[in-house]
Amino acid sequence: MTEEPRSLTMQRKSIPPHVEAAVERALEKLPADRFASAAEFGAALSDTGYRIPGTDSRTRAIALPPYRRTALPWIAAVALGFVGLLAGRWLARQPAVSDGPMRFAVDLDSAQGFPNTASVMVTPDGRTIIVSAVVQRRNVLLARRLDKLEATVIPGSEGAIRPFLSADGRWVGFAARGKLMKLPIEGGTPVTLADASWGGGSWSADGTIIYSQSYQTGLYRVSANGGEARELSKPDSASGELAHWWPQQLPDGRHVVFTAYRTPLDRATVEVLDLRTGTRKVLVQGAVMGRYVPSGHLLFARERSVLAVPFDLGRLQVTGAAVVVVDDVAMNYSDGFASYDVTPSGTLVVMPSAVSGTRYQIVVANRRGAERPVLADPDRYGNVRFAPDGRRLSVDVTPARGASDVYVVDGSRGSRTRVTSEPASDFGALWTPDGRDLVYMSERPLFELYRRAADGSRAAVQVIGGQHDRILGSISADGRAAAFVLSVSSGSDIWTVNLEGPPAPKAYLANGFNLGHPALSPDGRWMAYDSDESGRVEVYLQSYPDPTVTRQQVSSGGGSEPLWTRGGRELVFRRGDSVMAVTADPRTGEAGRPAVLFAGPYESDPEWSQPRAWDVTPDGERFAFLKWPTGTVRRQVVVATHWFDELRARVAGQREQR
């Protein structure tokens, strides 16, 4: 309904022109331009001289993804008289009763958006799809039974990330609040199994879970009933490995397929681990998200496509060439996750790349909440920041394919200019006080800090690297230092680094809790930040550079992402949809009572492991936000039943061509 189909004769030259012309007319967007009846359509298909009235039946060159090309016959049927909504609902019921191959879209209109790692799963019986989604700006799990018309939130799944299903499809595992948890797919109270801030596991029929414990670890094994977790593998940092992710236990119970993650992704590998000996074997170079399927193939992801290669399970060996079997799959380049899943019986579920991610609009608001857009069209924006002149902004842009980059937006002209163009993901930039440079994070594969000219006239220079992620928080008013969060396995700490001369990184605050979003005051005497030490994320104010002098909790009832305004006499922060403001005495650090300035559907990021999502001008008069789409955004995934038949045919066809 939103694109032009690719010409049939471009796909198969043997199709006669009059058949192509008839199908093109059947697929016209406007009902009045289509055939009036099935009989008229049939007559056109039989008329070798048929052409679309008033046209030359010119070739359309826009390629249609395979799942849409396969769907052409039933789309034509819908165009000839079925009401779209009723047909969609009828198709959604079919997998439970149909014995033949089918391909159809499933609505997930309950989702407001999807997180970066947009996990999509299908239960082994092929009857229920589960996705990680954003609902009311909270990460949750949605379940959509194919015999129902709507997806519903799984109760108890709030905060769930990187989910995975049990072998029987009755449970879902995930990471949340620093723990590995399990939950019945109908919902309930989550059960804690082990420590984990990552997840992304594989749950076998014998009750064994293999998962990734954190961002920089190897694989771990734990019982589905909980207990002590055992380390199975360690990343080889000397070869550039960051972590071992996305495991799948093979049917023999002895081996695990996993992704050895490196950046850029053409250096990542799909490997197999022997659980008895600990030895590893590379199966595919330049690949992620490896999955063995009973058709006798190994699937993996590369450049937003799923490829298949014949695989000898007994010898654990690839036995042929790789073939693209699914195009246009949503993929997160930062962790190598591709949004697809396959049941043992051959039901495939895919999230197309156009569906994943949230397209925000950049807006600027005043203290009363009156806003105006900065750019006309929404995009996959992130981490917007004001330049010191208040006219320009920096923002991340994540393309449909590839890594994110930092752009500079000119609000007065409504234009944007790309600043970074490295293979790595670059994001979360901050302006130096003179407005000449940007300091930002670059994933190589850890989050390292880099600096380059805002106009792109000078090459990037590394500020600091190391063995842990660094989440940039703020730059001092004199431009000589930056505060950042050092992400470690036990939590996150606040550090500082020199931007002039030797970096000399120095720990400022480490108390065993998760600290985030450090903000240095304009006079350099105070550090504002957020912390989860009370059991809820709150904003705190502490003396700087000596944190032992004085300390005060600023927010109550929750707060995150603090920023300074009015020369250090005011702090603003986020609490849900609300923008809060509180006075602060720059001499004593005493803060007043927070008050709501205004509220709106704006992106926020209370997680300490990510940079803040908003900004404010030094005078506190203007605020920059990423605005969530209003209303319900239509979301869909694509399902193909009996997909192994198509998979075998594609691989066999490729062999014949060779």
Image: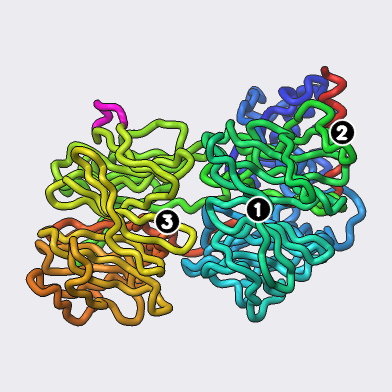
Q: Label 1: state its secondary structure.
A: strand
Disc 2/disc 3 C-alpha distance (Å): 47 Å
| Dominant secondary structure, magenta | loop
Q: Label 2: state its secondary structure.
A: helix
Q: Callout 2, which amino acid?
A: Ala
Indicate whether 229 appears above or below 337: below
Residue beneath label 1, please? 219
Q: Which label's residue is closer to the chain start, 3 or 1?
A: 1
Residue count near mark 3 (Cα–Cα under 10 Å), binned few <14, some 14–19, many ≥20: many
Disc assigned to residue 487: 3
Disc 1/disc 2 C-alpha distance (Å): 35 Å
Q: Label 3: state its secondary structure.
A: strand
**Residue 535: quadrant of the picture:** bottom left
Q: Which residues are magenta?
A: 455-460
Instruction: In the displayed orientation, state which residue is furthest to the front.
Output: 277
Q: Which label's residue is closer to the chain start, 1 or 2?
A: 1
Residue beneath label 2, please? 649
- Which circle, 1 or 2, is nearer the viewer? 1
Residue count near mark 2 (Cα–Cα under 10 Å), binned few <14, some 14–19, many ≥20: few
Disc assigned to residue 183: none
Indicate whether 388 appears above or below 287: below
Identified at 31% across, 45% down, the residue is: 429
The answer to whether residue 187 is magenta is no
